[in-house]
Image (cartoon, rainbow, N blue to C red):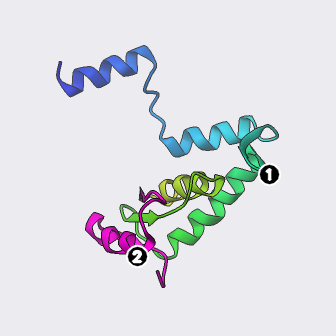
Amino acid sequence: MLPTELAEGYRRAGYWRGETLVDRFDATCAEHAARTALLDGEAQLRFEQVAECVERVAQWFATMTDPGDIVAWQLPNWWEAVVVHHAAIAAGCAGSMTDTVVPPLFATYTWPSVGSTATPKGW
């Protein structure tokens, strides 16, 4: 099956609805604003809180990136990683997560190889 035929089948079946991940994220956060979205140790965030954090970080990313840029980060599987991931997408960027088992110094050498334009300073 050709990719075009496959895509048309997904659209007919309702799997692809013509919305982006950002659209779906925003709609879900609005629809379930007061419900718990993330639990991480002592942290418990509602969808509206996650959306607010994502918006703030996305605005910050927009000050140092252009759409299509790659944003790299190194975080454990904490709630902040969810925010950074969605913020990168909301800013029109692609994300490149580096697992925390990779030493930070090594990560700073690998990020340029994926074309990252936004990485933490001073690592």
- The picture quadrant where one finds residue 3 is top left
> Where does label 2 land, which residue?
105
> Where does label 1 land, which residue?
42
Q: Decide: is 123 above or below 98.
A: below
**Residue range corresponding to the magenta coloring:** 94-123
Left or right, residue 11 beside residue 85: left
> Furthest residue to the left?
2
Task: Kindly identify the amino acid type of the residue bearing the numbered disc 1.
Answer: Glu
Which element is circle 2 on?
A: helix
Residue at x-position 61% and y-position 65%:
57
Q: Decide: is 47 above or below 75.
A: above
Residue at x-position 44% and y-position 22%:
15
Residue 42 place in picture, x, y as percent: 80, 51
Task: Kindly identify the amino acid type of the residue bearing the numbered disc 2.
Answer: Leu
Q: Quadrant of the N terminus?
A: top left
Left or right, residue 62 beside residue 95: right
* C-alpha gap between disc 2 and disc 1: 29 Å
Residue 14 place in picture, x, y as percent: 46, 19
